[in-house]
Amino acid sequence: MTTLGNFLFSFGFNFLVTLIIVRLIYYPTTPNKRYVFTFLAFNTVIYFVLTFMNSIEIGVGVGFGLFAIFSILRYRTDPIPIREMTYLFIIAALPVMNSAGSDVTIWPQMIAANIAIMVIMAVLEKEWGFHYEASKRVIYEKIELIRPDRRAELVADLELRTGLRVKKIAVGKIDFLRDIAEIRVYYDDIHQEGWLNHIESSIVLLNGDDAD
């Protein structure tokens, strides 16, 4: 196979694996266009950059340095949730690994590694054999409900206002001057966190518009 053929094959394989992870594993649980765009764009650009860096024989350390920069990116106005950061790390790691596909001798190992990543991500996302407990920090103003004898009322109010099926709660800091308390809410359905993050992002955007 020619050099161009190797390049097209390895790029196509890398993009196919990325598309499967993003579209079939990530997207069904969190249909967020912003992150889909970021994942696919990052993966494609990093793959091309690393491939061309390898072609001009720049040290592999430079490539890993670039990968490290991309993998720890944080957006100041819109912080990425930890789940999306994990996907971003994987999506950024794939082109680092697959850019070595120009060497046909490692294709079997490369294909096996990509398949293993897809299978593991699918298993974790579907929660097969796992039970996840998520939590969310809430600043709560009905301070009269934080008493132990009114716990049932507190849980009912939190479930009504957040839409979560609350498993347990932990009361943290209490500010009697402002009549607020910091409460950590624990719940089982990990997929509800994407909905909460979407609500929080909308609030940030609205506050930004108001500030203008």
Image (cartoon, rainbow, N blue to C red):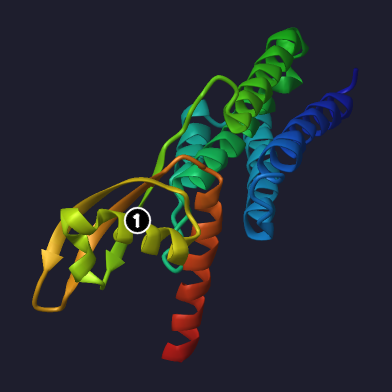
Nearer-the-camera pick, 82 or 77? 82
Where does residue 131 sit, x and y in percent of width and height? 48, 28
Query: Could you tell me the amino acid type at mark 1?
Result: Val
Where does residue 47 sit, x and y in percent of width and height? 67, 38
Q: Is residue 152 above or below residue 134?
A: below
Residue highlighted by disc 1: 155
Q: Secondary structure at mark 1?
A: helix
**Quadrant including the N terminus:** top right
Which residue is found at the position 58% from the left and 28% from the top? Answer: 127
Q: Left of 106 or right of it: where is 74?
A: left
Q: Is residue 193 above or below residue 201?
A: above
Q: Is residue 61 above or below residue 87?
A: above
Q: Left of 185 or right of it: where is 26?
A: right
Nearer-the-camera pick, 122 or 77? 122
Nearer-the-camera pick, 5 or 182? 182
Where does residue 171 sit, x and y in percent of width and height? 20, 54
Determine the image quadrant of residue 100. top right
Q: Residue furthest left?
A: 177
